[in-house]
Image (tube, rainbow, N blue to C red):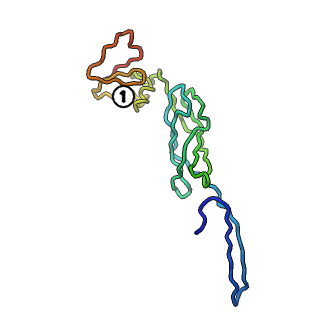
């Protein structure tokens, strides 16, 4: 079987002596180099203002020249960076099989940074509150309006059939929705 792993190899061809030919041996050395995976479809999850890039998750596809998936992990080149706004940041793909693949630098991926105060779509809910429940902070129409009643306070949800009564002096940070 021919070699398929990265490394240095030698092929030896031997011809036995017969009535027409003298015995001969020849060898050729060659190297199979590590491959660099091809990266595509790379994206990163949004982060809250004040967080580092390490709190964002990068995902994408890494394949080899035969279009087979290459397993590995994604990371930012500077995970301790604390972005002040949405921007692109350099990332790496590190293959599990580091004997046959190089780490790939894939360029940059955009990381959205959301404020827990900013309300881009002016629907009364901060962008970060909407991100936490999987809604689009840029579209007021993305918030649930299917008759569910609840309240948002800080990072938690409280739901009930009847809204609870909170004195006006304690309502800071509360939001009603139906």
Q: Which residue is outermost to the bottom?
A: 19
Q: Which residue is outermost to the left?
A: 161
Q: Nearer the viewer, residue 24 or 47?
A: 24
Q: Is residue 88 left or right of residue 31?
A: left
Instruction: Name the spot of residue 98 as percent of width and height, x first.
Output: 60, 51
Instruction: Name the spot of residue 162 as percent of width and height, x first.
Output: 26, 20
Q: Is residue 20 left or right of residue 162?
A: right
Crowding at dot 1, Cα within 10 Å, few <14 / some 14-19 / many 20+, comes out as some
Residue named by callout 1: 143
Q: Secondary structure at mark 1?
A: loop
Say above or below: 67 vs 122: below
Q: Which residue is outermost to the top?
A: 169
Q: Is residue 140 left or right of residue 67?
A: left
Instruction: Name the spot of residue 35 as percent of width and height, x first.
Output: 61, 54
Q: Residue at x 70, y 89 (%)?
A: 20
Q: Residue at x 51, y 37 (%)?
A: 57
Where residue 51 sits, quadrant-wise, is top right
Q: Residue at x 36, y 25 (%)?
A: 157
Q: Quadrant of the C terminus?
A: top left
Q: Is residue 146 left or right of residue 170?
A: left
Q: Nearer the viewer, residue 72 or 42?
A: 72
Question: How many labels sit on residues?
Answer: 1
Where residue 76 sits, quadrant-wise, is top right
Q: Nearer the viewer, residue 60 or 71?
A: 71
Q: Quadrant of the N terminus?
A: bottom right
């Amino acid at each position: 079987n021919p070699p398929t792993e990265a490394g240095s190899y030698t092929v030896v061809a031997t011809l036995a002596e017969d009535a027409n030919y003298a015995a001969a041996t020849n060898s050729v050395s060659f190297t199979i180099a590590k491959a660099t995976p091809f990266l595509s479809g790379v994206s990163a999850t949004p982060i809250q203002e004040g967080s580092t890039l390490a709190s964002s998750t990068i995902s994408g596809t890494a394949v080899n020249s035969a279009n087979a998936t290459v397993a590995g992990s994604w990371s930012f080149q500077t995970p301790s960076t604390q972005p002040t706004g949405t921007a692109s940041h350099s990332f790496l793909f590190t293959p599990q099989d580091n004997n046959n693949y190089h780490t790939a630098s894939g360029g940059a991926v955009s990381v959205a940074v959301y404020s827990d105060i900013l309300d881009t779509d002016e629907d009364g809910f901060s962008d970060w509150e909407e991100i936490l429940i999987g809604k689009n902070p840029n579209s007021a129409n993305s918030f649930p309006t299917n008759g569910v009643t609840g309240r948002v306070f800080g990072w938690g949800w409280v739901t009930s059939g009847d809204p609870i009564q909170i004195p006006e002096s304690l309502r800071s940070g509360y939001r009603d929705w139906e």
